[in-house]
Amino acid sequence: MIRSIDDPVSIMKGLLESLLISYRHDGSTQRLEVVFDYWKKTTGADRAFLRLRFSGVSEFSRTSGLVPDLQRFAASFSTADVKGGYVLQSVEIGQHNGIRVALGFGHSFGGISFNCTEVTADVRNARANKNGADWDYFDFDDGTPIQFEAPFG
Amino acid sequence: MPRLHMRATPLRYAACKAAADTRANGYFGWQNENNEFLDIDGNVVNQSAPDFSERTHIMYEGP
């Protein structure tokens, strides 16, 4: 079950060092979705995932990192498309044409920044079963299979 | 010998700033040249492992 959680701005500030799973910016709908591994799992769950959904997104910008090859990830990123991974290293939130947000994913990757009018947050808890060298995930509440790279479908 | 780099975490930065005395506490993270995350023994930790976060944040205590 996907649950909405309150106070997404505070949630964002507490996400430092969380694994970035994906982000996707859709300029036509002015929406941006960012998914992280989430440290605050419910009792009994093996893992939790967090989705931040920003609406009214404008002035989306990809901040360059030190590795040129990673600049191919501009409007979207999935951890499935890279060998390694990136964690959230910095969060800046201010007021500028609504809410101004800058998320940094380290010196190699760089980050993203944008303005938005609204942000919401959802969490999904999961159970994990080992499958060879990998892991299979299932929704904690109803057992629905979950893809690690796309835990919110 | 693989090239490794230490990811100075924000928590570690905070620990450094707070270390006006002789000791600091915090966490650090290791990643190899492919940006794969390592545990305290240098083993690559699969991102899909449920204990990924715990294994890749290595507790630091020292000067």
Image (cartoon, rainbow, N blue to C red):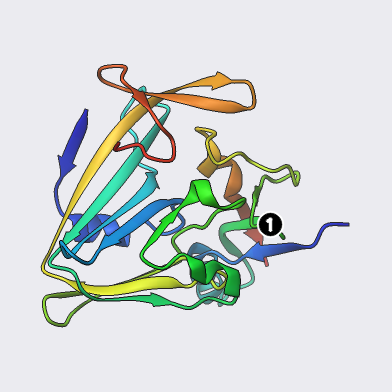
Q: Is residue A99 left or right of residue A131?
A: left
Q: Is residue A50 left or right of residue A37?
A: left
Q: Position of residue A140 (x, y in %)?
A: 31, 22
Residue A52 or B22: which is nearer the viewer? A52
User: Residue at the spot x=50%, y=71% of the render?
Assistant: A71
Image quadrant in which the N terminus of chain A is located:
top left
Residue A152 or B61: which is nearer the viewer? A152
Residue A145 or A76: which is nearer the viewer? A76
Q: Position of residue B6 (x, y in %)?
A: 67, 63
User: Residue at the spot x=59%, y=69% of the render?
Assistant: A69
User: Is residue A67 in sight in this rendering?
Assistant: no
User: Residue at the spot x=11%, y=76% of the render?
Assistant: A98
The residue sitting at the front extreme is: A28
Q: Position of residue A148 (x, y in %)?
A: 43, 35
Q: Amino acid at mark 1?
A: Asn
Q: Position of residue A82 (x, y in %)?
A: 57, 53
Kindly identify which residue carries mark 1. B34
User: Is residue B1 in sight in this rendering?
Assistant: yes
Q: Residues within 10 Å of mark 1 (few under 14, many from 20)?
A: few
Decide: is A126 above or below A98: above
